[in-house]
Amino acid sequence: MIPLQDFQKRPRVLVAGGGLTAWETAAQVLKLGYEVVLATPAGLVQPVRSLQPSDQALGGYVSGLLEQLKQHSKGWIIEGAQVTAIDGFAGDFQVELAGADRSWNEAVGAIVLAPELSSKGPGSTVPQEASRTGITLDRLAEAFAVPDQAPEAFRSLGPDSYVALVSGLNGSGGLAEMAQALSGALKIREEIGSQVYFFTGNIKVAEEGLERLYLACRDAGVVFFKFEEEQPEFLVRNERPIIRFVDPLVGRSLELGPDLLITEEVHVLPEKMQALAEEARLGLDRSGFLQPANIHLLPYQTMREGIFTAGPGKGPLTPPSALEEARGAALAVHHFFQGREVEPGDREVVVDKGLCTVCLTCLRFCPHQAIGWTHRVFIHPLACRRCGICASECPMDAIQIAGYSDAEVENRLAEIGTRWGEPAASGLRIVIFGCQRSAGTAWEQAQSAERQELDAKKPTLSEVEFIGLPCAGKLDTDALLKALTQGADGVLVLACPEENCRSQQGNTYARRRLGEARDYLEEAGLDPGRLRFAALSSNMVHKMHEIIDRFVEDLKR
Ligand code: SF4
Ligand code: SF4
């Protein structure tokens, strides 16, 4: 590993995105004293369109931001450009940018991806045939902004008209869409006077201002229908939308033929940003937004050190939240440059050049893109999150992680074997290999005096030894077998639950290696049930006891 002190971070930040979060992030990063390259599409990309007056005022503030950024001596504003590839490591990235007629590279130390979302049309809660008779909430915002170009159905609305607005039905949409829907309903009531019927599942108000907005809608006369089980039916008759439903309050069947049906819009990460995130292995969540849903990731972190993400790209956000995100992302960048994100060098990862055959297995497996290769393999100290996955996957055992090297784990097992001495006269002996972040925390809690008192009433913890790993992905097949040769009756592997591994797949790799060790036992005529895998979060002390108890019972049998 290159010594950390030899490594200079380039104090230059690339911010990519064309809306409120990106521009505010750029402004905040400039304020913190770094040079900024802002790659932004031509013109401001509207966030999930809000109809709240306070958010529209925010729009005015953001429009003025770009001009301010252009005046700044350390700001490089590139309009009409987007990021197409990312190369290099934390502190020293080469970012490929593409404009209308050229592409070029920018060298930066950190990157913030802050894209706005694209609209993908109405969601699936209202059948397409019915939703086509109306407009979406995004179109409603445009209709209010430019009434001359609004659809006829909107322009002919008046105080005697009926509007049906659908949002949050059957769990659809998020807070941003709810804010958009409530503000739309209120604006129609206040400015046009039409009667508004709001069809929803659950009013989401878990953000500042939403509860107030909901109450304002009710005061203005918006009628809410909340459906929990039986959902309304949307039809089309004579080219008009028809809604059939059972009134959830009084249980009566009703039919409504509104003059205008307004539905939610589905918002997605723009395709090019999604392709970039996949290519750069930054991690996406199940809905295709930036940042995997992983409790171990800090708010602005991606799977790669030095690359941050903020704003609606992580999922639709209201404008005030997007602004908060921008400020948080700028601080995360600052902490990165200050070195606070880097763990102390006591867990150095070292490649033995003599053993390495440059097979590049480690490079393929590293979840954080921390391994590089020129004529030899090297591990980048800023990009490496010291999970140890590469060390366990290396076929030559050429990578060792300080504190968890093969020799150190072997010594620990030998110590346990010596302490245990002769086979236990009664009871069973268990070795647990556990991820330090989850099982390790649960184990520490279990060791507290208070807990021990509680556990004294239970017999199983007395002969259990815990060996912490930086990530379950650092588990070695050899270590599992050695634990048995040191006198363990059974070996338990405790990893983070699926999708909650900080290194994405460390838990999957651990399970695979445990499977291999079980195959060896079976070939040797031993019971593979002596090795067991279980998932555990850091706050599951009780579940850990249950897992151990069940394992002990099964081993006894
Ligand atoms: S996996 Fe091991 S042998 Fe292969 S390149 Fe990496 S360090 Fe070298
Ligand atoms: S696999 Fe883990 S320990 Fe190895 S280089 Fe990547 S981040 Fe570092």
Image (cartoon, helix red, strand yellow):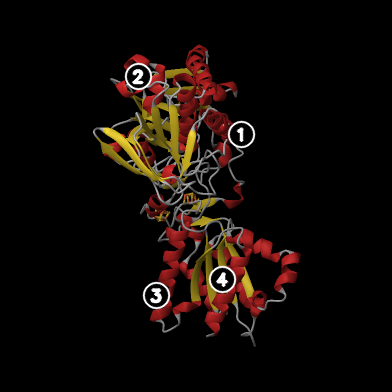
Q: Look at 59% across and 75% down and name the residue there.
A: 549
Q: Is residue 234 visible?
A: yes
Residue type pointed to by label 4: Ile
Residue type pointed to by label 2: Arg
State whether residue 215 is above or below residue 400.
above
Q: Secondary structure at mark 4?
A: helix
Q: Which residue is mark 3?
A: 519
Mark identifier at residue 155: 2
Q: Which residue is mark 4?
A: 547
State if disc 3 and disc 2 touch (CB < 8 Å): no
Q: Nearer the viewer, residue 467 or 63?
A: 63
Callout count: 4
Q: Secondary structure at mark 1?
A: helix
- Looking at the image, is mark 4 or mark 1 earlier in the sequence? 1
Estimate how packed mark 4 is, as few (under 14), some (14 to 19) or many (20 or more) residues with alpha carbons within 10 Å. Answer: some
- Looking at the image, is mark 3 or mark 4 earlier in the sequence? 3
Q: CA distance from mark 2 to mark 1?
A: 55 Å
State whether residue 420 is above or below residue 452.
below
**Residue sitting farthest toward the left:** 238
Residue type pointed to by label 3: Asp
**Disc 1 beta carbon < 8 A from ligand 2?**
no
Identify the image quadrant of residue 420.
Answer: bottom right
- Where residue 333 sits in the image (x, y, percent)? 55, 32
Q: Secondary structure at mark 3?
A: helix
Q: Which residue is mark 1?
A: 338
- Where residue 474 sits in the image (x, y, percent)? 50, 59
Identify the image quadrant of residue 432.
Answer: bottom right
Q: CA distance from mark 2 to mark 4?
A: 64 Å
